Image (spheres, helix red, strand yellow):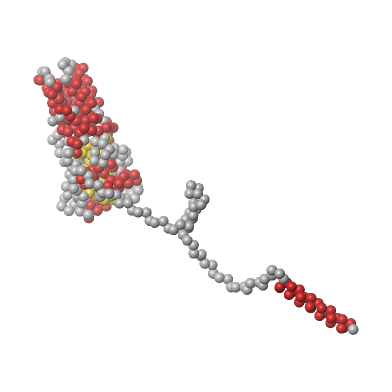
Amino acid sequence: MDGYLGVIVIVVVVALLAAGGLFLLFRPGGKAAPPVEPPKSPQTPTLPEQRPAPSAEEGEGATTTLPPPAPPAVVVPEIEVPPPSAGRMVRLRSRLARSQSALGRGLLELLSRDRLDDDVWDEIEESLITADVGVAPTRAMVEELRTKVKVLGSRTPAEVRELLREQLLTQINPDLDRTLHVQKHGERPAVVLVVGVNGTGKTTTTGKLARSLVGDGKKVVLGAADTFRAAATEQLQTWGDRVGADVVRGPEGGDPASVAFDATAKGIEEKVDVVIIDTAGRLHTKTGLMDELGKVKRVIEKKATVDEVLLVLDATTGQNGMRQAQVFAEVVNITGIALTKLDGTAKGGIVISVQRELGVPVKLAGLGEGPDDLAPFDPEVFVDAILGDENAK
């Protein structure tokens, strides 16, 4: 009996355990465990192109999944056709007269007085020196004027004007060769080296000169050898783009002589008429200036001849400009002067003093800020502008 009861107890326990397992398996909401799958290698999901999150200005609703932007359109600047250089200074005479005629009127008024005593001559001398004519040229002019006034005796306004005109022209020397030497040598282009301290308008003058030569029908290459000023390179690039002139440039702070060499080589390769090299003007010691400009000139001459070395001077700087001119003249063989801002000062006498000091002619005059305001210097137009146009010859 006891054995029978033991069997019954075992059967009951097994039944209860089996019922509990079925309950757990099939309880309400219960699900069978998902089959275990082998792990897959990770893959990068394919998503539309992402753009940076919108800024506060764009607003919270801006989408971040936009199609890729279209490439920016390349804007090709329109090539301009500049006017020729001939007659520019005549066209700009009125602008020159507005700034210079005060000197002429003052001198004419003094010379027209009934009595020319020592005090009046002192005033005439002072007026000329103040206009940056220079001490030596002023004394020569005054001495010559005094002699001729004594010979004439009485003086009409026309005679006074002619006396003064003659003396100013004599000091400016209209017989100097002011030709800009920009003619090709067979297959080789002419090379113009532009020098001067920064702030005188050197790079602008380089660009305006290129524009003037293009207006005369010449093909030009520009060399941006002022590598120490990124702004100078960009400025020259803008000038070149406007008239279709290629610009050779180098890395910022690079070797200026290398840029000058490459520009000359490109000019030869493209059979252009003129290569114009804009040089650095940042150096204040004569030794450093000599080393750099000397190297630039030497490497150019391995390819071509340097036909012009133009010194750019700011006419408003007066005697400071003269000191700069003397340093450059000692360093490099200057062939001509480009005077900028000549329309903005009554001290036009610097034309006389700088020519006398350096022994080279003023060849170009900057008479404004416009792109075509650089003109070949004409002594007679200049003197007539000083004395007033109403009686100009």
Viewer-side residue, 240 vs 260: 240
Place of residue 74 in the rendered image (x, y in percent of width and height, measured from the top left): 33, 53
- To which quarter of the image does residue 354 belong? top left
19 relative to 37 in the view: left or right = right
- The residue positioned 67% from the left and 72% from the top of the image is 32
Q: How many marks on residues?
A: 0
Q: Image height check: is 65 above or below 80? A: below
Q: Is residue 205 above or below residue 269?
A: above
Q: Most extreme residue toward the right, as rendered?
A: 1
Q: Is residue 109 visible?
A: yes
**Residue 44's x, y, as percent?**
51, 65
Q: Left or right: 47 with respect to 135?
A: right
Q: Could you tell me if residue 360 is visible in this image?
A: no
Residue 43 lies, with reference to residue 111, above or below; the image says below
Residue found 26% across the figure and 39% down from its top: 370
Quadrant of the snapshot with the C terminus:
top left
Q: Residue at x 17, y 28 (%)?
A: 390
Q: Which of the 4 image quarters holds residue 175?
A: top left
Residue 248 spot, x, y in % from top left: 28, 50
- Position of the N terminus, as image quadrant, is bottom right
Q: Quadrant of residue 377?
A: top left
Looking at the picture, tell me which residue is in the foreground, 187 or 371.
Answer: 371
Q: Which residue is at the far front?
A: 28
Residue located at (79% from left, 76% from top): 16
Residue 362 in the image: state x and y as whole percent.
Answer: 20, 36
